[in-house]
Image: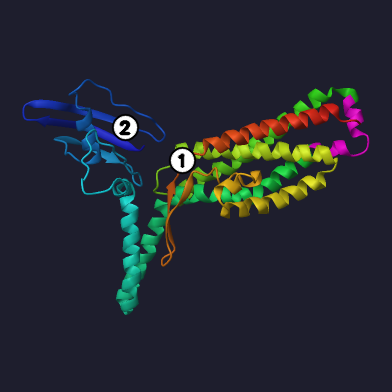
Amino acid sequence: MILSCSHISKSFGTDVILNDVSFHIEDYEKAAIVGINGAGKSTLLKIIVGELSADQGDAVLSKGKTLGYLAQHQDLTSHKTIYEELLEVKRPIIEMEEKIRSLEVQMKHVTGAELDQMLDTYTRLNHEFELANGYSALLYSIPVIEAILLPVMMAVLASRLWDMEVKGNTAKLLYTLQTRRSLFAGKAVFGTLEVLLTAVLELACVPVLGRVHDYTEAFPKGQFVYLFVCTLAVDLMLFFGELLLMLWCGNPLPALCVGIVGALVGLFSAFLPPLVSYFVPFGYYIPLSAYEVANWDQASHLVTYGTRAHNWGLLAFTILLGIGLFAAAWRKVQTEEV
């Protein structure tokens, strides 16, 4: 359970706004408060977030959970810039980082028991900082790891899927039992399911790690779904590209070599200008990522992550490129002489 509201009542003078309100919200549950103007919706929300106190009852938030609240009327400080106002969203993390920096300076000038106490506080704050950035750090790192490993894995899957057909008279024997269309369709479907299973197993680790390490950061559902779609699109594009290359060469070795070299080139393309990286499909995992480094403190090596706009244009191009490679592989099978 995330939130429990029990017997909440609130009055303003003689006007009873809320009377014995009780409900609870479970994990991953979506809830809406519906009512006419003046029914007490905003009052209830203010009691939940702590802006108002209830006359009776209480609202209890589960341990380790945080609230995000966008008020109906925003009280913006006029002297702040838009950027400074947006930073308020990350204010707890920024303040934690400032405390860590301050402790680093103070520890240079103390000894003995005072130093030990500061070291304990420093260690605790660093751990809390990591937990508060847990999902962001994980979703930032995953595309980099994917760019290293998945091009090779897609080459292995593609080569194993069609390897038997390049040996001896296997292809001739298969084509006497079924049409080329059905053979390719069967292998394409099976290969797609393999790629899908790979993506599911890989990204299933994200919520599991979050639970195991007790990340305090809210789970970014939208960014997680976007990452899954991008990962699957790039995986399938590389899979059909490697399959096409193997069909052209009649040997799985070139596809494996291209996968290994492509992984290295794709990784280093992340350090090139964005326009250049678009010409390296093996590294599309990285420019499609929705996370970037917002701030890196060189002294303490603390990293704060932020999000960037989803690259829908590159994602659409990746999907179209995958479709084109699938069509080329299909045509190759249809016209291949055996």
- How many residues crowd around disc 1 within 10 Å: few (fewer than 14), some, or many (20 or more)? few
> Would you say 227 lies left or right of 220 here?
right
* Residue found 34% across the figure and 32% down from its top: 25
Q: Quick check: 174 above or below 226?
A: above
Start-end of magenta stretch = 162-175
The residue that label 1 is drawn on is 309
Number of numbered labels in the structure image: 2
> Would you say 289 lies left or right of 242 here?
left
Question: Within the magenta stretch, is there residue 171?
Answer: yes
* Quarter-of-image position of residue 319: top right
> Would you say 34 lies left or right of 165 here?
left
Rendered image: mark on residue 24 = 2
* Residue found 46% across the figure and 36% down from its top: 222
Residue 150 at what x, y percent from top left? 66, 46
| Type of secondary structure dominating the magenta stretch | helix
Pick the front one: 308 or 92: 308
Q: Is residue 252 visible?
A: yes
Secondary structure beneath dot 2 equals: strand
- How many residues crowd around disc 2 within 10 Å: few (fewer than 14), some, or many (20 or more)? some
Residue 90 at what x, y percent from top left? 34, 49
Separation of disc 1 and disc 2 at Cα? 34 Å
* Quarter-of-image position of residue 202: top right
Question: Within the magenta stretch, is there residue 123?
Answer: no
Name the residue type under label 1: Ala
Q: Residue furthest right?
A: 169
* Residue found 75% across the figure and 48% down from its top: 258
Q: Earlier in the sequence, mark 1 or mark 2?
A: 2
* The C terminus - image quarter: top right
